[in-house]
Image (cartoon, helix red, strand yellow):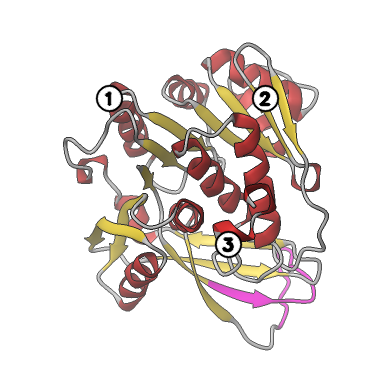
Amino acid sequence: MILVFGSLNIDLVAAVPVIPGPGRTVLAPSYQTHFGGKGANQAVAAARIAGPGQVRMAGRIGRDGFGDRAIENLRANNVDADLVVRSDEPTGCAFITVDHAGENAITVASGANMTTSAGDLPAGLFGPDTVLVLQMEVPFAQALEAARRTRAEFGTVIWNLAPVPEQMTRDMVAALLAVTDYLLVNEHEAMDAAAAIGFAPSDYESAAADLARTGDLTCIVTAGAQGALAVTADDTRLRAPAPRITPVDTTGAGDTFVGAFAAMLSEKAPLQTALQVGCDAAAQKCLTRGAQAGMPMRAAIPSLA
């Protein structure tokens, strides 16, 4: 069973000629509403590959229309939403601008996500077959508690260290590494995490090696067009190439990789297979606008054909 403990948002997306810098305003002809939140994104991505009955989402939403729509969307995508709790805070909302090259800038109003609690997870939920997926859009202490409870019952913890907190301390990274089996980061997140615990890596590959060794875990780095790299605690290194595409919108690509990777781990697939499926799924997502709209079904992934 894949359990995603994390954020649920509604995304408001505008296509712009250029992403505005400080003090600058750009006009967009319109905007679109999409479902998002890194937690919900990863749950949907996993469910589209793992299939019905395999993914549960835990988090918090508001007592509002956005929250109603978020629940409906999860269920429409075969994600069990029974662990999603209503909060007095509004449902999280993300404001996204996307330029002609498919690059994006995102501002997130967390809302109910900041009230998410590991106490919402019932006793008996965890076991050896649990694959817990975490991110950094809900309170860190609560995610850490969920990870500890999973590890106590011999489950597997995947932690996507994104977005990197502005005040990421050495103690925070050390605590995260201690309860994680698979740390998933992009190039910049790998460098930031390694620096936070006292290393001075020359590149993301050496950063991944530092993190894997320190945490006795496997560090996965997603590097866009360069594909993905896995470094294990004993310094074994595996790589998977990224398909060549012309991206339309990269929003949600990293979350698609995480969800696909989790689906493969839940099926006990080899690490090399999980890496390649993650790369293929993320590339497919980049061909469609919206964080979840382009997340592929299992049949669309070449490495699973």
Query: Mark 2 sits on what residue?
Result: 208
The front one of 304 and 10 is 304
Element marked by disc 2 = helix
Q: Which mark is residue 223?
A: none
200 falls in the magenta region: no
Element marked by disc 1 = loop
The front one of 222 and 63 is 222
Element marked by disc 3 = loop
Position in image of residue 3 (x %, y %): 36, 44
Left or right: residue 288 compared with residue 52: right
- Look at discs 3 and 2 and give the one toward the viewer: 3
Q: Quadrant location of residue 74?
A: bottom left
Left or right: residue 101 compared with residue 131: right
Residue that extends furthest to the bottom in the rendered view of this protein: 29
Q: Are marks 3 and 2 in contact (CB under 8 Å)?
A: no
The magenta-colored residue range is 12-27
Position in image of residue 197 (x %, y %): 58, 19
Task: Tell me, yes or no, if residue 189 can be seen here.
Answer: no
Position in image of residue 228 (x %, y %): 71, 38
Counting residues from the start of the chain, the first of labels 3 and 2 encountered is: 2
Task: Tell me, yes or no, if residue 142 can be seen here.
Answer: yes
Cα separation between marks 3 and 2: 27 Å
Residue neighbourhood size for the residue with mark 3, other residues' Cα within 10 Å, grouped as few (<14), some (14–19), many (≥20)? many
The front one of 41 and 178 is 41
The structure residue drawn at horizontal position 65% and vertical position 32%, both measured from the top left corner, is: 272
Residue neighbourhood size for the residue with mark 1, other residues' Cα within 10 Å, grouped as few (<14), some (14–19), many (≥20)? some
Counting residues from the start of the chain, the first of labels 1 and 2 encountered is: 1
Cα separation between marks 1 and 2: 27 Å
Q: Which mark is residue 153?
A: 1
Query: Mark 3 sits on what residue?
Result: 295
The structure residue drawn at horizontal position 71% and vertical position 66%, both measured from the top left corner, is: 287
Left or right: residue 189 compared with residue 11: right
